[in-house]
Image (spheres, rainbow, N blue to C red):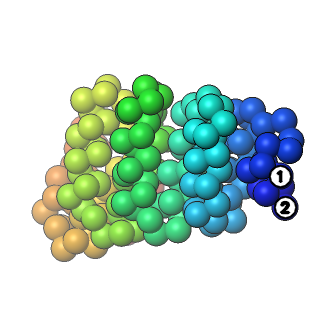
Amino acid sequence: QLFSVMEHGKVGSDTITFNSAISACEKAVKWEKALQLLSVMVQSKTDMDTITFNSAISACKKGGEWEKALQLLSVMAETLVESNTITLSSAISACEKGGEWEQALQLLRMMAQCKLQANEITMGAAISACEKGGKWKKALQLFSAMAQSNVQSNTVTFS
């Protein structure tokens, strides 16, 4: 009901309100609604920020929509919204869930180019993507790179 009210402009909607609603969609695994709200933000010329996209990308990740997550990264670049470690970690996790190891590694390289620090979540998702793609040598290389970068491994990384 709130979404309908927001879509029709019947309630004062600002970036924070939309971010909260998109985050709620992410938690409820309603990626379609999250993208609808993003579209309403564009139509109503409401500013989008990193939090907006992080929530929408995470919603796509949870919904198994890795391609949509990557499209959102492109929109971020087009709209000059800065990505961060959370943004790219979510996108890498989306690729991992979709079995897209090559895309995950490309995003990992992009992180390095953007001078963003990968963390155990990022590396774990990239390693898992390689494992799902049958690329165990790549997974071992990433695990080794983790140790060299002083990124802490966790139970997920070891499994």
- Residues at circles 2 and 1 in contact by the CB criterion of under 8 Å: yes
- CA gap, disc 2 and disc 1: 6 Å
Above-or-below relation of 66 to 10: below
Q: Is residue 93 left or right of residue 127?
A: right
Within 10 angstroms of label 1, few (less than 14), some, or many (20 or more) residues? few
Q: Is residue 34 left or right of residue 157?
A: right
Which residue occupies 25% across, 55% down? 103
Query: Which residue carries the number 2 mark?
Result: 1
- Choose between 98 and 122: the one closer to the eye: 98
- Choose between 46 and 95: the one closer to the eye: 46
- Image coords of residue 23 (percent x, y): 68, 50
| Residue 35 sits in quarter | bottom right
- Image coords of residue 34 (percent x, y): 62, 55
Above-or-below relation of 129 to 124: below
Q: Is residue 48 left or right of residue 25?
A: left
Which residue occupies 63% across, 65% down? 30
The quadrant the C terminus occupies is bottom left
Q: Is residue 20 left or right of residue 29?
A: right
Which residue occupies 53% across, 64% down? 62
The dot on residue 30 is none
Q: Amino acid at mark 2?
A: Gln
Query: Which residue carries the number 1 mark?
Result: 5
Q: How many marks?
A: 2
Above-or-below relation of 130 to 74: below
Q: Is residue 117 visible?
A: no
- Image coords of residue 139 (percent x, y): 22, 60
Q: Is residue 107 visible?
A: yes
Q: Amino acid at mark 1?
A: Val
Within 10 angstroms of label 2, few (less than 14), some, or many (20 or more) residues? few
Above-or-below relation of 150 to 89: above
The quadrant the N terminus occupies is bottom right
